[in-house]
Amino acid sequence: MSNLISLVLRENQLTGPIPQGIGDLINLETLQLDTNQFIGNLPQNICHGGSLRYFAASNNHLDGQIPKSFKNCTSIVRVQLRGNQLIGDISKDFGVYPNLEFIDLRHNRFYGRISSNWGQCQQLQTLLLGKNNITGSIPKEIGNCTTQLGELDLSSNHIVGTIPKEFGSLISLMKLWMNGNQVSGAIPFEFGFLTNLEYLDLSSNKLSKSIPSNFGDFVKLIELNLSHNDFSERIPTHLMHLSHISKLDISYNSLNGEIPMEIYKLESIVILNLSHNHLSGFIPKAFEQMHWLLYADISYNELQGPIPDSNAFINASVEALQGNKGLCGNVLGLQPCNVSMIYKHSSKRGHKVVFLLVFPLLGVVTVLLSIFGFFLFMQRRKTDLESKQSKTEGQVLSLSILHFNGRTLYDEIIKVTNGFDALY
């Protein structure tokens, strides 16, 4: 069938090897063999004619290496090879594909380092390399995919090193999975430029230092997972600006300090996991404003005091609350709160409000007093004549105080101050 352009056999129960002769169809543009039970190797002459655009062989039992003819398949647009036992050096078996938009190589046995060639695929929108045996660090050249790349999956490999600051150039990125590797160090500031992110998973790595405050700029973020790392310091208050986030997991870190009172701003949150950190203090009553919150895990911290009057806490399991030093409330597994504990919680919250109100007011008063003192200073520099006149009138006022009643005294004050003139 030398004129065959499209062959679609997907989602059947076909078995055995893929006929090698399929690779000799020089006009073939679409070949879809996915979701069957094929075994053996891919056709060695695949893309021999230079016309292949769409190739899918996912979810089979294929093994062996990628055909050498595929490395120069510049016509290819979409590739799906997920869920096989394909093997080979990922840095050598794939080339530069100027028309490539989508490639899925997940759940195979590819090894080697991530090639810088992916940065030269200028039309690439989706690069999925998760669940392989990839090693080495992330090449900075991957930041060259600036215009199109929307999904990147590097999860469940053996990637080491730090996150390159060039990641900040991937401004179209919406989904990023890097979980299950050995990436270390601090997250670069430039990472915060990825403001189109909707899903971000950096869990189960060796990331450290603080959670960058500019993560709060990910206004489109729906899910964020930073668990099983070594983040320290406090939870950034700016992180509470993620108004669209529905799932937040920052468990199994070394975070300390109190839970931010501004947490109520996470108005779309459904699942929240803060467990296995060093968080302390009282749980903010702001949780009572989070009506969408269904599940909250605060176990194994240093929290104390009453739990909020929220369904996520009232209906929580013992496992989600255990491992703290002093929680109380009408929940199975907790002691009832005594009056002093409730008062202490309310008093502490009240003190914070007082501080927020009083200190700005003190600043305003200080400024006003300074201005008033300046005018007094200028007033004292009046002429000697005015000074003597003020002294005489002061003596008259003293005599008035000694010899007159209240009404007369008032009239005298009006007289000597010339109707409360600023001069006197």
Image (cartoon, rainbow, N blue to C red):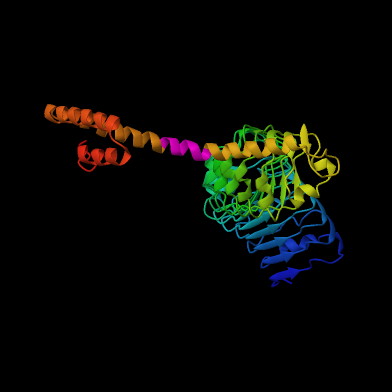
Query: Closer to the camera, 282 or 107?
Result: 282
Question: In the image, is residue 220 above or below residue 250?
Answer: below
| Quarter of the figure with residue 45 | bottom right
Query: Closer to the camera, 12 or 166?
Result: 166
Residue located at (83% from left, 62% from top): 36
Q: Quadrant of the C terminus?
A: top left
| Quarter of the figure with residue 305 | top right
In the picture, measured across the screen, residue 128 lies left or right of residue 358, that is right
Label tally: 0
Residue located at (65% from left, 55% from top): 268
| Percent coordinates x, y for residue 374 in the rendering | 27, 32
Question: In the image, is residue 298 above or below residue 95?
Answer: above
Residue located at (86% from left, 44% from top): 332
Query: Closer to the camera, 84 or 371?
Result: 371
Q: Quadrant of the N terminus?
A: bottom right
| Percent coordinates x, y for residue 139 in the rendering | 59, 40
| Percent coordinates x, y for residue 350 in the rendering | 60, 39
Query: Closer to the camera, 99 or 206?
Result: 206
Is residue 177 visible from the viewing direction of this image?
A: no
Magenta stretch encompasses residue 362: yes
In the picture, measured across the screen, residue 369 lies left or right of residue 221, that is left
| Percent coordinates x, y for residue 293 in the rendering | 71, 52
Helix, strand or loop for the magenta stretch, by majority: helix
Is residue 258 visible from the viewing direction of this image?
A: yes
Magenta stretch encompasses residue 352: no
Q: Which range of residues does the magenta coloring cover?
A: 356-363
In the picture, measured across the screen, residue 311 lies left or right of residue 259, that is right
